[in-house]
Image: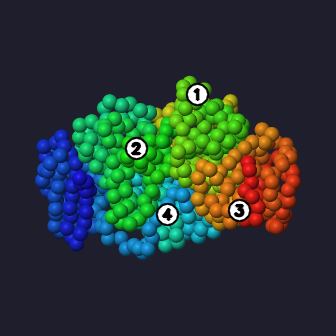
């Protein structure tokens, strides 16, 4: 049974609910914006399972409130919807249900249809707000994007952060525009046919500004993972902690009209109870789906190469829609860059990328030299549409020593090979902001904490994390520096020279993905991949019906020309990465038998009409 928590306003009345099971008295401290009312301290009523409630007359939107626990100072509400003064100040009463929406016809979008664009609110635009993202939506539509994914927006300490250090999970960051700014963005996206993903963090809390420990046993005492004490999902009082985070997820989906949640590091959500928290969360989201008639999506980040999150409830799984696929990224990146440091040591051969196409997990019950153990399980039972792939994301850029993008590490031609390989793969593609025009500005890790000891601890922690990537003479920028943050903002040079060429190339790839019939439905049988001469990966994407065309993609990661004999059939050239934007290739047809000369670092796409000939054999 769910328990709504937080402050709710309706026609001058306020309803307040907070969980504090280990104290004997809780008082609401509320300061009205009406000077005649001023500050009030009101005793709250104790209810079952440690909840305290109170209904109050004469409450105004904008009033500040907090809770006094056994005569303590007043602390902000752990379920605060708004922190206009930051994490150290009291919470704000807002009318969370009164926002005027214009997206009534919007029902969401299934994961299989998404072209996802991951962005960080603070660095996507020069102003770094929700409202200024709205100004860029037409740009994203022209590119072909139909889904944006916001890095975490839950209130964090200071004004600069990736968002994974949030400490008020229910409150949208004040410096981004707060809850109303987020809702305006979501509403604008839906009116333009764009779905909205939100990254949420349920595995740890940020290190500065959290007040949860004052209220109750939110944290586990028996685990000690890398980010500090995790949340209590399986110890005494864990029912109420689970309620807190399920209410949080439902708030983003129901109150804020978010379409999809990406759960960060789900392998660090530790729960050894009979029903894992993630299963319970998924069940509640499914129930909300049925009540609202909308297509909500849950995707997990997970480093275990397991399929637990994807399995259905009746198979004792968590029932998620999808999962990020790091193995595909690692196989692709190491081929493009020859980077074998740290966890990339397990990758680097073209056979790894082929296995990612055929079997999804490269390590699926096989031995990992980097981990010094067997890793993963098979995943072929799950459709391609359950996995999200990318060539870059916030982690794979920002967690490098120099936080440098792929555009500064490989040639322009290789960038095109990489883009074609993942955007026209059978998986769900995700772009990281700026890659579509070969942005060269880095994306650094940045913070704006206040505690000097914490700042130094973060600095030392980052240095230690980079040890696996360390190279002589390289230095990383101070994450606390404001300049580090400003250097991470996009340059928006997409209309200049090669940047414009790359932008148009990405746009063409996305057009192919959205319009070609082979992308309407994928299964394991209609995708085939093979290797030619150790440097070329080919994959065919066969149609579901014989009236459609087969698509053949060829990626040459090598540094030399390769001669490739195409399978039997009459082939029409759809895309040549090296000729794109320079020569007109429309209508070029090749009749068998034919051998294609592939330049070094090139990506080609051919299609073959099967309506009047037998299906090709690969």
Spatial separation of the CA atoms under disc 3 and disc 4:
26 Å
Which residue is labeled 3 in the image?
549
Q: Mark 3 near mark 2, Cβ–Cβ under 8 Å?
A: no
Which residue is labeled 4 in the image?
109
Q: Position of residue 359 (x, y in %)?
A: 60, 42
**Local secondary structure at mark 1:** strand
Q: Position of residue 26 (x, y in %)?
A: 16, 49
Q: Is residue 377 left or right of residue 508?
A: left
Which residue is labeled 1 in the image?
367
Residue at 21% across / 58% down in the picture? Answer: 16
Please tell me which residue lies in front, 386 or 131. 386
Which-is-in-front pick, marks 4 and 2? 2
Tell me if residue 387 comes above or below residue 125 in the rendering. above
In the rendered structure, which disc, 3 or 2, sits on the residue that comes first in sequence?
2
Inspect this view and state whether residue 577 appears.
no
Q: Mark 4 near mark 2, Cβ–Cβ under 8 Å?
A: no
């Amino acid at each position: 049974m769910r328990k709504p928590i937080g402050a709710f306003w309706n026609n001058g009345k306020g309803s307040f609910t907070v969980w504090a099971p280990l104290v004997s008295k809780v008082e609401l401290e509320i300061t009205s914006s009406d000077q005649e009312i001023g500050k009030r301290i009101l005793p709250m009523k104790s209810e079952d399972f440690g909840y305290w409630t109170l209904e109050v007359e004469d409450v105004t939107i904008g009033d500040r409130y907090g809770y006094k626990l056994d005569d303590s100072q007043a602390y902000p509400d752990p379920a605060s919807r708004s922190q206009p003064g930051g994490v150290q100040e009291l919470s704000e009463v807002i009318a969370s249900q009164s926002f005027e929406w214009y997206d009534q016809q919007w029902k969401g979008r299934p994961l299989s249809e998404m072209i996802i664009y991951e962005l960080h609110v603070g660095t996507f635009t020069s102003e770094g707000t929700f409202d200024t993202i709205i100004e860029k939506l037409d740009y994203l539509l022209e590119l072909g994007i139909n889904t944006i994914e916001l890095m975490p927006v839950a209130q964090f300490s200071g004004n600069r952060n990736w968002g994974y250090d949030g400490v008020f999970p229910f409150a949208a960051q004040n410096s981004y525009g707060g809850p109303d700014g987020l809702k305006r963005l979501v509403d604008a996206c839906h009116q333009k046919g764009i779905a909205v993903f939100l990254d949420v963090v349920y595995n740890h809390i940020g290190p500065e500004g959290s007040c949860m420990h004052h209220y109750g046993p939110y944290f586990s005492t028996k685990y000690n993972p890398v980010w500090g004490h995790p949340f209590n999902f399986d110890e005494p009082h864990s029912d109420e902690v689970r309620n807190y985070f399920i209410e949080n997820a439902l708030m983003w989906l129901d109150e804020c009209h978010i379409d999809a949640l990406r759960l960060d590091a789900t392998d660090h959500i530790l729960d050894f109870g009979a029903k894992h928290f993630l299963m319970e969360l998924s069940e509640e989201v499914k129930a909300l789906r049925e009540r609202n008639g909308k297509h909500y999506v849950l995707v997990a980040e997970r480093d275990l190469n397991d399929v637990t999150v994807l399995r259905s409830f009746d198979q004792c799984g968590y029932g998620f829609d999808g999962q990020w696929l790091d193995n595909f990224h690692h196989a692709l990146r190491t081929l493009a860059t020859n980077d074998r440091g740290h966890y990339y040591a397990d990758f680097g051969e073209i056979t790894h990328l082929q296995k990612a196409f055929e079997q999804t997990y490269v390590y699926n019950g096989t031995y990992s030299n980097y981990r010094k153990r067997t890793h993963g399980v098979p995943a072929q039972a799950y459709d391609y549409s359950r996995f999200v792939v990318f060539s870059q994301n916030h982690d794979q850029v920002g967690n490098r020593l120099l936080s440098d993008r792929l555009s500064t590490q490989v040639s322009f031609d290789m960038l095109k090979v990489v883009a074609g390989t993942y955007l026209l793969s059978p998986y769900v593609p995700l772009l990281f902001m700026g890659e579509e025009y070969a942005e060269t500005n880095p994306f650094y890790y940045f913070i704006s904490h206040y505690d000097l000891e914490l700042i130094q601890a973060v600095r030392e922690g980052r240095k230690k994390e980079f040890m696996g990537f360390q190279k002589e003479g390289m230095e990383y920028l101070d994450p606390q520096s404001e300049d580090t943050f400003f250097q991470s903002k996009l340059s928006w040079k997409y209309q200049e020279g090669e940047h414009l060429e790359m932008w148009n190339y990405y746009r063409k790839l996305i057009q192919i993905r959205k319009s070609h019939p082979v992308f309407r439905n994928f299964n394991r049988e209609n995708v085939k991949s093979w290797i030619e001469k150790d440097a070329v990966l080919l994959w065919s994407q066969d149609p579901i019906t014989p009236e459609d065309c087969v698509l053949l993609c060829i990626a040459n990661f090598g540094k030399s020309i390769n001669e490739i004999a195409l399978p039997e059939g009459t082939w029409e050239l759809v895309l040549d990465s090296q000729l794109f934007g320079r020569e007109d290739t429309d209508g070029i047809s090749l009749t068998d038998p034919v051998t294609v000369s592939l330049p070094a670092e090139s990506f080609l796409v051919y299609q073959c009409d099967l309506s009047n000939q037998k299906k090709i054999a690969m």
